[in-house]
Amino acid sequence: MVSIEQPDIGGAAVNIREEQAGDAPAIHEITRLAFDGAEHSDGSEPGIVDGLRRAGALTLSLVAETEGQLTGHVAFSPVTIGRVEQGWFGLGPVSVLPAFQAQGIGSALIRDGLERLRASGASGCVVLGEPDYYSRFGFVRDARVTFDGVPPEYFMVLVLQGAAPAGAVTYHPSFYPK
């Protein structure tokens, strides 16, 4: 069992657990609200999570629970690098209800998820996001691992074991809504 320090929200402990049957509607709503109006969002995030779940490609789906209420969610799904599955995963989306943001819930979800990936033998994880935020988890820019269409400084890798492969990253088709 991995021990991850959980945030304490106004005296209420936050429990991180795997998604359970019946959590999907709450996860959809958390994700919708978390990204509603965000300048970097096109509103597709809830559909991405739903699509990953339908396709059986939601490798790791964790929720944060505060006093019985789901307050956050993080998704991890397989990616290919250079068109080859190499035991690497994509982090995201990560979502926290607006009233609970900036209280450590997102960080706790990410840390717990990365520890679970490491414990499962995963080779690494990629993320598209704010470098200042994701670097605190060990993500770094690696010019050998690319993702087309985004500024390269916003696409980062975290090696969990072995070495980083080289090539273009492709996410599950759920990330590319038609």
Image: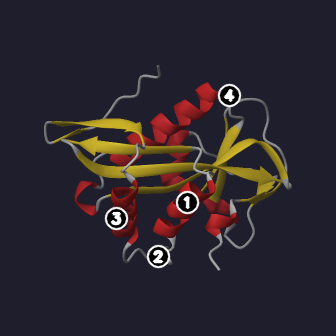
Residue 48 lies in quadrant:
bottom right
Rounded to the nearest angstrom, the CA distance separating label 4 from label 1 is 24 Å
Label 2 element class: loop
Rounded to the nearest angstrom, the CA distance separating label 2 from label 4 is 33 Å
Q: In the image, is 15 to the left or to the right of 43?
A: left
- Label 2 crowding class (10 Å Cα cut-off): few <14, some 14-19, many 20+? some
- Label 1 crowding class (10 Å Cα cut-off): few <14, some 14-19, many 20+? some
Label located before the other in sequence (2 or 4): 2
Q: Nearer the viewer, mark 2 or mark 3?
A: 3
Label located before the other in sequence (1 or 2): 2
Label 3 element class: helix
Label located before the other in sequence (3 or 4): 3
Residue 122 lies in quadrant:
top right
Rounded to the nearest angstrom, the CA distance separating label 3 from label 4 is 31 Å
Label located before the other in sequence (3 or 1): 3
Label located before the other in sequence (2 or 3): 3
Q: Nearer the viewer, mark 3 or mark 1?
A: 3
Three-letter residue code for mark 4: Gly
- Label 3 crowding class (10 Å Cα cut-off): few <14, some 14-19, many 20+? few
Q: Which residue is mark 1?
A: 129
Rounded to the nearest angstrom, the CA distance separating label 2 from label 3 is 12 Å
Q: Nearer the viewer, mark 3 or mark 4?
A: 3
Q: Which mark is residue 105?
A: none
Q: Position of residue 140 (x, y in %)?
A: 64, 47
Q: Which mark is residue 121?
A: 4
Q: Position of residue 99 (x, y in %)?
A: 22, 59
Q: Are marks 2 and 4 in contact (CB under 8 Å)?
A: no
Picture residue at 58% right of the left edge, 39% below the top: 138
Three-letter residue code for mark 3: Glu
Q: Which residue is mark 3?
A: 29
Q: Which mark is residue 43?
A: 2
- 151, 174: nearer the viewer: 174
